[in-house]
Amino acid sequence: MTNNVDYCMANSEISMSASYGCFGDSCTNTPWVAARYETISGSLVTRATFPVENDLCEVNPVEYSVRNSGLTVDYEVETRQTLPAGMSYVPGSSEVSLNGGTTNAIADPAGSGLPGDPLIWDAGLIPLLAAMQPNDQVTIYYEVALGCDVVTGDNRFIAEGAFTDLCGNRVTNREVVSVLAPKEPLLEVNKSSSV
């Protein structure tokens, strides 16, 4: 027997019975049995990557990808990125690629990137985030300025995603931490002497 659940129910138990050998009004019935089911939950994977070398006191690129890794559509997807101390988002640097396609410029995200005020990209900036199909991937490219004081921080980017599942529940994926390794500054010392 196959049952299709067409909507989200508070009770996840289905009771059923069958009858066989019917002749007129006389049937043999099986006992009632109960089966439980789990609704399929969506899944979202977020990841930030950087070039191997990142220069201090310069502008450096960041690649931030968000992928629906589940079996159902993720609705109202929102991606958040918190920058490490000493780094700041470069206004006007956001670009997006959908499912590996062409890269296009988009408006700046909401937020500053500071703890408690992450950079936020949503469907208002990237329409695909309104309803991400399984395996859809959004790749966001942007730039950060590495202040000279970044060497005193932990250089941890925090990536987080949230979406609404099939049943209308708001789901937040776990935070993913990526660490950026700034290139050591090159110091030159010139000495001169006079006699």
Image: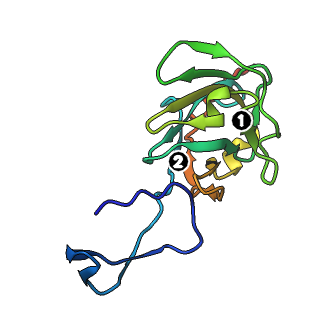
- 24 w.r.t. 123: above or below: below
Number of numbered discs overlaid on the protein picture: 2
* Residue found farthest to the front: 24
Mark earlier in primary sequence (1, 2)? 2
Label 1 secondary element = strand
* Residue found farthest to the bottom: 31
Residue 51, percent across and down?
51, 29
Name the colouring of the figure: rainbow
Q: Residue at x 24, y 80 (%)?
A: 27
Give the residue type that dot 1 points to. Trp
* Viewer-closest of 111 and 99: 99
Label 2: few (<14), some or many (≥20) within 10 Å? many
| Mark pair 1, 2: CA separation | 14 Å
- 63 w.r.t. 78: above or below: above
Give the residue type that dot 2 points to. Leu
* Quadrant holding the N terminus: bottom left
Residue 69, percent across and down?
44, 45
- Relative placement, left or right, of 94 versus 128 is right
Label 1: few (<14), some or many (≥20) within 10 Å? many
Quadrant assignment, res 2:
bottom left
- 76 w.r.t. 123: above or below: below
Disc sitting over residue 121 in the figure: 1
Residue 95, percent across and down?
65, 20
Quadrant assignment, res 34:
bottom left
* Viewer-closest of 118 and 167: 167
Residue 35 in view (yes/no): yes
Quadrant assignment, res 118:
top right
Q: Residue at x 49, y 41 (%)?
A: 68
Disc sitting over residue 44 in the figure: 2
Q: Residue at x 33, y 78 (%)?
A: 17
